[in-house]
Amino acid sequence: MQNTKTLQRNEIPEEYTWDLRDLFPTDAAWEQENESLKADVARFAPYQGKLGQDARTLLNYFRLEDEIGVRLEKLYGYANCKSDQDTADSFYQDMKGKALATCVAFSGASAFSAAEIMAIPDETLERFYHDEPQLEEYRRSLYQIRRRREHILSPAEEKLLAAAGEMADSPDSISGIFHNADMKYPSVKDGNGVEHPLTDAGYTLLLQSKDRVLRRNAFETYYSALGQFRNTNAALLDAQFRQLRFFAEARKYDSTLSAALHRTEVPTEVYTNLIEAVHANLDKMYDYVALRKERLGVDELHMYDIYTPIVSDADEKIDFNEAKETVLEALSVLGKDYTDLLKEGFSHRWIDVYSNVGKRSGAYSSGSSRPHPYVLLNQKDTLDSMFTLAHEMGHALHSYHSCKYQPVSTSDYVIFVAEVASTCNEVLLMRHLLKKTTDPKKRAYLLNYFLDQFRTTVYRQTMFAEFELEMGRMSEAGMTLTADALSEKYLALNKLYYGPDMVSDPQIALEWARIPHFYYNYYVFQYATGFSAAVAIANRILTLGDEAVRDYKKFLSGGSSTDPISLLKLAGVDMSSPEPVNSALQLFGELIDELRSLQ
């Protein structure tokens, strides 16, 4: 498909859109299920006050939670996909709001359960396991609840916090609508005076252009337009951290970071140690920036020069069909069962491929896998788009394996491991392309791309993580997150991470306003830890073969059956050590040396 302009939704050929009928055949069927679920809220009431009564009652309660959870996942998944395919469609925005309201209603209806489960004496719970062996399926879930004992409130307070959940989502929701549906940008001219449309989704693609005039115009125009709403964006982030602080304080955590990481059993030291490890390796980032400045042949390297390839005339158009075939070839090392699942996803319309007017920017996997995952792309027929396909299908097949091999209660893996499978696919794809590429110029182009993955995934995401940590600390100190305060902090970090050979243009101080992940509650650091783990796993797979593949699939199938550090140990990686991060950045330095030697 030629993708030269942004089409209306109804202009996209059906084969390039996801088939949501596997969730619900019609909108009317969705409405019927929503009404049915709203009525089923009452099914939780008979259990209130009785969860510690006997093993059978506790088991039946968990079975009910499983049933409702699967139905809610489908309900919200359908509405979310529908609203994301056209964020300006008010009908599906309303549907998404209804789905969220139904989810919140169930959170409130079941809010009593945590406190009651906490109150069950240890010896009584052990007797329950003996009396009802099927309850063993929920031992992990029970442990996860009871380990948070000091952070669980009374049933009435829990119900109140659950009801506040709908309001707590507002900063993220408003920011998403603002950036995807309402924010408009003027067109920009290239060096020949030709105008190009500027959109949030297409901004980075313009920065990849060889035309420096176009890059500079896109950069300056984008931030000039966004800067008109700097105070609005700051107010949204301030609201985000106020709500995080509210919940953290209500649950007696000492910080918003502790509250976020405690849910996933990740020590806060992993977060801060990552920042320290990257700081210790900033010399390699500075070396990369110096090489980029040299290869581009510029007197000054600006932030709008950071995305364009430094190897000329080696980029090529890669259409979606070619991207699929290359991804299948690269991931064949994971076995026929894995590539068969990929083929099923490609042929059965799990993927919404191309951009359309109003479509959510970026890319994601839905995370659920009942009956199968869904993937949103904004395909641009570039090398980057091919890597995005591999990345998102890594997420999708991780979800698929977890849901297939784990019971409902432990099928949803935690965010700390969420980026490992996706990034492992990217690393395997890159190693495949490098293996079959002998032309020095093409090899140099791939190395440049791989280096940019390190830059954007390890260094840049760690910079984001450090900025997010600073926002949390500022909010916890009682400061308002103003546009001026955020811009000052962000510009200082940008200078630190990019070093002396980079001109930190004043406009880049506003980059915080365009990062949706700052609404994801300390998510971004896991891109960096996940990338480091993925590099180690991919290397193990390519070195050891079948043994490593078997270990990796144990991880993929693990869901949340144990803590994330233990899950990664199944795949042969110990993230409690700084070794994976240091090893990945050592490779980054070696790749810089190889690229320097090729030209």
Image (cartoon, rainbow, N blue to C red):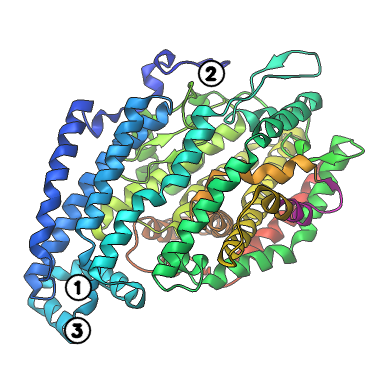
- Category of crowding for the residue at label 3, using alpha-carbon neighbours closer than 10 angstroms: few (below 14), some (14–19), many (at least 20): few
Amino acid tagged 1 = Glu
Q: Is residue 383 left or right of residue 140?
A: right
Give whichever of discs 2 and 1 has the lower sequence position. Answer: 2
Residue 522 position (above or below residue 207): below
Q: CA distance from mark 2 to mark 3?
A: 60 Å
* Residue 568 seen in render: no
Q: CA distance from mark 3 to mark 1?
A: 10 Å
Q: Under tag 2, what secondary structure?
A: loop
Q: Who is closer to the viewer here, 586 or 443?
A: 586
Q: Disc 1 marks which residue?
A: 116
Q: Residue furthest right?
A: 299
- Category of crowding for the residue at label 1, using alpha-carbon neighbours closer than 10 angstroms: few (below 14), some (14–19), many (at least 20): some
- Category of crowding for the residue at label 2, using alpha-carbon neighbours closer than 10 angstroms: few (below 14), some (14–19), many (at least 20): some
Q: Disc 3 marks which residue?
A: 121
Q: Is residue 80 left or right of residue 380?
A: left
Please identify, in this view, whether the residue under mark 2 or under mark 3 is nearer the observer. 3
For the residues labelled 2 and 1, say whether their Cβ atoms are less than 8 Å apart. no
Please identify, in this view, whether the residue under mark 2 or under mark 1 is nearer the observer. 1
Range covered by the magenta-colored residues? 490-503
Q: Disc 2 marks which residue?
A: 6
Residue 68 point in image, percent of width and height = 18, 50
Q: Quadrant of the C terminus?
A: top right
Residue 132 point in image, percent of width and height = 9, 73
At a point 32% along the width and 32% down the height, the residue shown is: 94
Residue 192 position (above or below residue 321): above
Q: Who is closer to the viewer here, 114 or 436?
A: 114
